[in-house]
Image: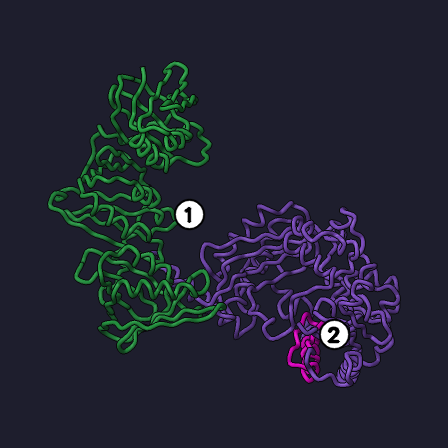
Chain colours: A green, B purple
Amino acid sequence: MQLVINSMEFKNCLESVEKILPTRSAMQVINNIYLDVKPGLLVVAATNLEMYIKRKMNYCGEEDGKVLLPPKIVDIIRHFPTDEVKIKINWDNKRIEISGGQAQFHIFGSDTEDFPIFLGQENTSGEEIVIEQGLFKKMLRMVVFAASTEETRPAFNGMLISLDGGTLTFTASDTYRLAVKKAFSDHWQGKSFRLLVPARTMKEFLRLTNESNLPVKLKINNNVLSFQFGDVFFATRLIEEKYPDVSSVIPKEYKTRITVEKKMLEEMVARANLLADGKNQAVHFAVRENDLQIKAGGQEGRMEEVLTVEREGKIQELYVNSRYVLDLIKQVDEEEVSIDFHGDGGPLIFRIPGRQDYLYLILPIKKVI
Amino acid sequence: MSSKTIFLADMESFYASVETARNPSLRGKPVAVCGDPALRHGIILAASREAKALGVKTGQPAWEAQRMCPWIIFVHPHMQLYIDYSLRITTIFEQFTDRVLPYSIDEQFLDLSGSFLPGGSPRATAQLLIENIWSETGIRCRIGVGENPLQAKMACDCFAKKRPDLFFELNSANYANLTWPLPIGSLFGVGYRMVRNFQRIGVRTIGHLAALPRDILRRRWGISGEVLWLNAQGIDYSSVGPDQIQEQKGVGHTATLPRDYRNQQEIELVLLEITEEVCQRTRRRQKIGTTVHLHCRGADFDHPGGFSRQKKLPEATANAMTIYPTILNLFRQHWDRKPLRAVGVSLNGLTDYRQLRLPFSACAAKEESLIRTADQLRERFGKTSLFRASSLRPGAQLLQRAGKIGGHDA
């Protein structure tokens, strides 16, 4: 008895679960890929205890059993010579024979008994919503980069997903900047939740390649949020920390507003970033009579550049971390962005003109006094 | 590249010479500058030529010096006076060249390449400098000349100090001949530990080191090993000039303790005082720092123990209470529980700019203004006008050290 599998499809499956395999974990068993075979259907899964990913695919055969595959399997399939792989598994001693064309591999699988069970599997109940995949990923991209990667305050390693009155809101901040993106749908009316998801796992989710644009089903069960679309099931643990109320730090009225062409701003800030000084990568923004001047400089030299902009309100100048500006602009698909200034120590707020559903706030850099 | 003419001027027994210059009745007598012999400050900071001739050495305890030479005259240090003298000497040098680099309180580099040499030769110019310093300050100055700062330093330390004319010149032609027979410890940059390391691999003279292949040094000790190899060859790529005076990258403070400290609580108390001092000085310069460095020196003088460790802070700051936990962690992790004679803290990676934070916790702004107010109070009414109550506990150093420079009387 054997499994006859399309090697391309199998490779895709393995590669998408491989990304979350822990590189070295004290728990040997989770360094492996979980394989569950039912007649005609196989499931591969992996976990690093924080997140869990599972993919399904069809195959030809009538096998039934479970085995742990060593991570080497991914490379083996990646380099396989034929379009079709034949896999023979001895369910008793977990020996696996992989063959195709003239190539033949014998590898050692192991028992699935100690593999951790991740909660929140498909068939459990819980609050759920459905969202279009493109929109979901776009929302993620616009927000998740603002979360902190430092381990000092765990709440800020998370991205807040909240649903209330049909409005879904993503929020992330590292306390130096803040991104908020909203979306509305009638289908979400009457449901409400507030979840803190590790930003790391959301970045991993963005990396999941899936050509299909199937809608994503979000479901909350116990302390796990799961995402399901097509043959992919992805689940993450939630962070049990209090997230602060961010609305109190967003100023209501701006003192200065400029509107700039996104592409021009991106290129200009990227150039200024080349000479931006120190850990803060500070560049100087000066909103003048009818242009925006950007200056950067340090021990290696200085640069300055000017861009014509539309301005409302007072002239204003301040220092800002150029990396933070670039982080956002790279994600923007629209042609223009607007920047609001709020005086000397106040934040810069980036928005997409004509849209109320997004803001990105950066606090400036001030000279020490 | 045309060859350079670098001078290193070294003031003989600087502190003792200044004292003698100020009080001519001390001339010709064995004089030693030292702090209060009752406390640890009773070590010899400087000894006059007459005292050195009797075997008195810098760094020796005062009682030992007194036993060697019962009629020795002890003088209390006057640190501010020494600083003033050092600056006066710089002014004299600046009449000869604009490229003067004070290397320490009693050593200064001069770059005279391409300059007009009064007297025509380096030797004649050096004689003139020595005479000028002597007549204006009453201090004997020794001058080493070389084609780079290293050669000048070696010429001064290994030769000029022992010559009656107080002058010596090294150049690429005579460097190997003259320095290679010297013991490895005389090479600039080779300290107590490196001597030990070198002896272990059979290097006893500078010549032995010069004869080793360069890679061996690089492999074993990295860049610093390679620099020592270059030093042995008489090669030095550094220069003397205004660009050498770099912006200060850190603020540090080290305290030699009045006795060996072995009680954890007492050491941690002094660490807090030093951290506060370092932060105050950083704030006075309107900077914040990104890395802290803790340095502890063991009590055993002959086998210097202790450690030196640093840690990057999550966020640039100059707030002592933000930094102190990091210092404590470093200390508790690395201290081997042996008694300490000195502890130091420094704050490095200084920057002028602070990335502002969202006010999720409102107390940050309050703390900021509290610190600023405390700074203003101390600025106006003195260091001891406002201090932590812990500085009243046994072992605290703040009240004793206030009003001193480098731990010695101003």
Distance Cα–Cα, label 1 vs label 2:
52 Å
Mark 1 secondary-structure assignment: loop
The magenta segment: B82-111
**Mark 1 nearby-residue class (10 Å; few <14, some 14–19, many ≥20):** few
B170 or B250: nearer the viewer: B170
Residue B9 disc label: 2
Q: Position of residue A344 (x, y in %)?
A: 33, 70
Residue B90 magenta-drawn?
yes
Q: Position of residue B295 (x, y in %)?
A: 62, 55
**Mark 2 nearby-residue class (10 Å; few <14, some 14–19, many ≥20):** many
User: Which chain letter matches label 2?
Assistant: B
**Disc count in the image?**
2
B93 or B84: nearer the viewer: B93
Q: Is residue B34 visible?
A: no
Q: Position of residue B154 (x, y in %)?
A: 76, 66
| Identity of the residue furthest to the front in this view | A102
Residue at image coords 22%, 67%: A253
Residue behind mark 1: A151
Residue at image coords 23%, 30%: A122
Image height of B323 relative to B372, above or below: above
Q: Amino acid at mark 2?
A: Ala
Image height of A131 relative to B27, above or below: above
Residue B274 magenta-drawn?
no
Lateral position of residue A120 relative to residue B357, left or right: left
